[in-house]
Amino acid sequence: MLPSRDRCSTFGPTEVELLHNIFEQILEERGIESSGEKANEIAARLISVYQSGVRDVEMLKTLSMRSRN
């Protein structure tokens, strides 16, 4: 299990790999291009949700897809 770090500003290799894999899964599942505004928004939300302490993969995916509105 990954260490819980609240609002960390840096990520280790394991965390980067995890976030990358989740990001790729979201894009594939939703049919979203990796280079575009929507992908950028998802990436930003994914990092924010992870920094808030969420570590469950499915919850990270779900919360990363929610609109900030």
Image (spheres, rainbow, N blue to C red):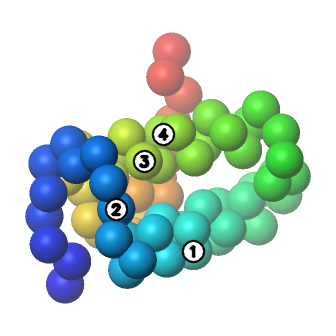
Residue 35 location (% of width, % of height): 84, 47
Instruction: Name the mark nearer the viewer: 3 or 2.
Output: 2
**Residue picked out by circle 1:** 21
**Residue picked out by circle 2:** 11
Compare residues 3 and 53 and report the one nearer the observer: 3
Identify the amino acid type marked 2: Phe
Compare residues 69 and 34 and report the one nearer the observer: 34
Is residue 3 depicted above or below 26 in this figure?
below
Which residue ends up furthest to the bottom in the rendered image? 1
Quadrant assignment, res 52: top left
Identify the amino acid type marked 4: Arg
Q: What is the CA distance from the residue labelled 2 to the residue labelled 4?
A: 15 Å
Which label was assigned to residue 45?
Answer: 4
Identify the amino acid type marked 1: Asn
Residue 15 location (% of width, % of height): 37, 71
Q: What is the CA distance from the residue labelled 3 to the residue labelled 2?
A: 10 Å
